[in-house]
Amino acid sequence: MAQRLLNHCVALLLAACLASPSAGAETLPAAAADEATAVLLRERALGDSGAYKIVESLTTEVGARPAGSEADARAVAWAVAKFRALGYDKVYTEPVKFTAWRRLSESAEVIAPITQRLAVTALGNSVGTDGPLDAEIVRLQDFEALQSAPAESVRGRIVLLTRRMERDRDGSGYARVLQMRSSAASLAATKGAVALLIRSLGTDDNRLPHTGSVNYVPGKAIPAAAISGPDADLLERLGQRTPSVRLRLNIATQTQADSISYNVIGEITGQDAKTPRGEIVMMSAHLDSWDLGTGAVDDGFGVALTMAAGALIKQLPQAPRRTIRVVLFANEENGFDGARAYAARDAGDLSRHYLAIESDWGAGPIYALRHPPQNAGLTARLSRVLAPLGITLDGAAGAPGPDLGLLAQRGVPWIQLAQDATDLFDHHHSANDTLDKIDPASLNQNVAAYTAFAWLAANVP
C-alpha cells in the first residue's frame, strides 16, 4: 500500500510538470514525462477504471448477442452510444457481411441399452439432423484417433470424441483439443459417419455443454454437437458395459445469407493525425457473443477494458502523439468476419498501424508481456510501468489473438499481454459465461496495463 501511494504521488508530481509546458520542457525529458503519465494512468485504473460499469451495462441491457441477431444490432447501437458517452473524439461503424447461423432446437438421449437424456448443444455452423437421428455411437479419443480409424468402423455411426481438455495457466490445453470441434465433423463425414459428438472443450465438471464453431469442408457436412463432461463420462461407462450404445440426436438450425453487422470503432485523435503518416495504436476486442450465456467474459471483458482504457487517456489534458483506435470486431465467434473485413482495407491504411493488441482470453489477471515491440526503449518503459502490476517480460513467442492474427498476417505489428486462463474454460462458450465470473480487481488490473501500453506506444518516438 505504501509503495502504491508513493507511485501515485510521484506520478501526480510528474504529470503536473507535463501538463505545464514551461515546467515540463525545462525539468523533464519527454520520455520520462510519458512514463510518468503512464504511471498516473495505471494508478487511476487500479482505483476505479470504470470498466466494470461498462460490462455490467452490456450484459444487462443487451445480454447474449450472436452475430446477425436482433440483439447483435442492439449491441452495435449500445457500443456507438457508449463510445460517445465516454468522450471519444470519433465514433463510426464499418459494415460486415456474412452468413448468420442460429440454433433452433437440440436434444440428445441414450435409447439403448437404457434411456437417459444428455445435455447437448449444437456447434456453431452445424447443419441439422432433419428430424430425429438414431444411430449407434463409436467412441474414439480425439481427432488423431479419428484420422486413424478405419472407415468401416465409423460408417453409419455417430462419432463420439471423448478427450478431456487439460487445465493450463496459459490456456494452451485448448489448442490441443481444438481440432475435435473445428475439423472432426468433415473428417468423420468422409468416413461415412452420420453425426459428430464431442466432449465439450472445457475444464469444468458442470452439466453445461460448451459450444463453438465447426468448419466444414464443402460437401462434407454432418450434424455436430457437444455434450457436457459428465454426459461424456456416462457414455464412456456405458460403453464399458455393452458393445452397443445407441443415441437419438435431434438438431434444428437455420442460416441467413447476406446478414449484416458492424465493426464499431472509437478513436482518440492523435496530435499527428493530420500528418501524411498519421500512425495508429490499436486496442481490440469482439462485440458479438455466443447465445448460451451473456457474453460477459467472452468478450464483454475485452470490450469493457479497451473502451475504458481509451476513455482514461481521453481525460488527460494533452492528446497522445499517435491516434488511439479501439476496434470492436463483428462476428469473431463464428467466422472472424469483422477482422477479415478490417484486414481487407487498403494496405496504406494498415501500414499506419504502429502497434496493436487484442483482449479475448478470459477475465484473468495479466501476468506476462510477450512478443514485445521491436523498439527497445518502448519495451524497457513498458517493463518498468507494468512490473508493479505483477507483469513480467516473458521470452515466450506469444500469440496476437484470433482477430488480430488476421491483421498480423497483413503485417500489422502486435504485442501480447498474456492473461491467466486457468479458469477460463470452466465457462467458455457455455451458459455459465455470466457477469458473476468477472472480478472487478482483475478487470481494473487489465485496464491499467492496456492504458499504460496505449499511452506509451502512442508517444514513443
Image: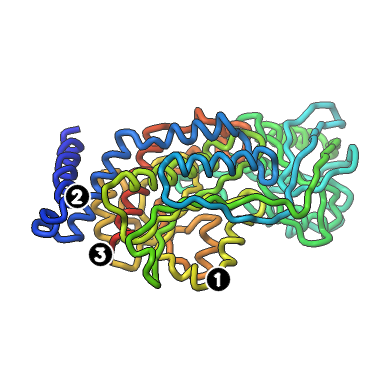
Q: Badge 1 local density, few (<14 within 10 Å), some, or many (20+)? A: few
Name the image quarter holding the C terminus: bottom left
Among numbered discs 2 and 3, the one appearing first in the sequence: 2
Residue drawn at point x = 49 percent, y = 46 percent: 361
- Please give the residue where the numbered disc 3 appears in the rendered image: 377
| Residue 227, image x, y percentages | 71, 37
Among numbered discs 1 and 3, the one appearing first in the sequence: 1
Q: Badge 3 local density, few (<14 within 10 Å), some, or many (20+)? A: few
Question: In this rendering, is residue 108 above or below 26?
Answer: above
* 107 left or right of 343 in image: right
- Numbered badge on residue 19: 2
Residue type highlighted by circle 1: Asp
Residue drawn at point x = 40 percent, y = 32 percent: 440
Give the distance between the C-alpha atoms of the residues marked 1 and 2, in whole angstroms.
37 Å
Q: Secondary structure at mark 3?
A: helix
Residue type highlighted by circle 2: Ala
Residue drawn at point x = 81 percent, y = 54 percent: 221
Q: Secondary structure at mark 2?
A: helix
| Residue 342, image x, y percentages | 57, 61
Question: In this rendering, is residue 154 above or below 113?
Answer: below
Residue drawn at point x = 43 percent, y = 68 percent: 352
Number of numbered discs overlaid on the protein picture: 3
Q: Nearer the viewer, mark 2 or mark 3?
A: 2
- Numbered badge on residue 346: 1
* 403 left or right of 170 in image: right
Name the image quarter holding the N terminus: top left
Give the distance between the C-alpha atoms of the residues marked 2 and 3, in whole angstroms.
23 Å
Badges 1 and 3: C-beta atoms under 8 Å apart?
Answer: no
Depth check, front residue: 106 or 15: 15
Depth check, front residue: 151 or 129: 129
Question: In this rendering, is residue 171 above or below 354?
Answer: above
